Image (tube, helix red, strand yellow):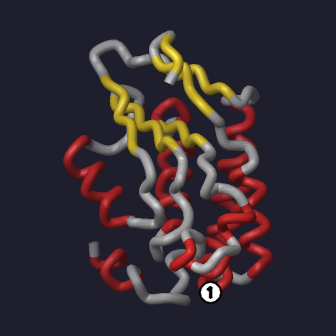
Amino acid sequence: RNHYEKHSGSGGVKPISEATAGDLLDGFASAYLERYPSPVAEVPVPADGRVVIVGDTHGQLQDVLLIMRAQGPPSPKNVYIFNGDVADRGDNACEIFFLVAAYFLANPGSVVINRGNHEAEALNHLAPEDGGGFYREVCSKFGPAMYTRFVAMMKVLSLCDVVGGKIF
């Protein structure tokens, strides 16, 4: 909580080091593509577990943290699907991506992220008041080279899911 309060809404303050951020994004992208090589992710419903579907967080880290507090963190029995639109508009999309990537790397079956229309360069480059802002957020915290790494990561995300044998 202290880390979040120190860094949330603070503009260009880096939530983690640039080296750690890059390693996390690159590691996630590689592992995600290996686990989900198709744009359609097959997501089984865990026995004695559930799937939590979260959509359109748009950089609102506090909302994601509240959801995880209420529903429990991602785990093999508590699978999360982030149904796109993590980026743009809010100030903390980087932190959401880092958090979700870390959970995925810890338990690959616990998190799926779909690529929404806001995980695209055209929208990211718009101003926040026009529905974009992710490019500015990343550049203010890490610089344009890190944005390129985010784009590479977003390109491997799933486009849709089959959850428990049903198309979602």
Where residue 75 appears, as percent x and y from the top left, is: 39, 35
For the point 46% across and 66% down, which residue is it? 59
Residue under the point 40% across and 32% down: 79
Give the answer, above or below, for where 87 lies relative to 82. below
Mark 1 — residue?
140
Which quarter of the rendered picture does the N terminus lie within?
Answer: bottom left
Q: How many marks?
A: 1
Judge whether 133 appears above or below 56 on screen: below
Q: Position of residue 45 (x, y in %)?
A: 41, 18
Left or right: where does residue 71 sit relative to residue 53? Answer: left
Give the vertical position of 50 relative to 143 (above or below): above
Q: Residues within 10 Å of mark 1 (few under 14, many from 20)?
A: some
Comparing 156 with 109, the one in front is 156
What residue occupies the far front of the structure in this picture?
130
At x 79% / y 76%, what residue is drawn?
145
Q: Position of residue 69 (x, y in %)?
A: 23, 51
Front residue of 85 and 77: 85
- Where is residue 151, by image quadrant? bottom right
**Image location of residue 77, percent across then percent down:** 35, 26
Q: Quadrant of residue 7?
A: bottom left
Residue at (31% x, 66% y) in the render: 62
Q: Is residue 102 above or below residue 161?
A: below
Dot 1 falls on a residue whose secondary structure is helix
Q: Amino acid at mark 1?
A: Ser
| Direction left: furthest residue | 70
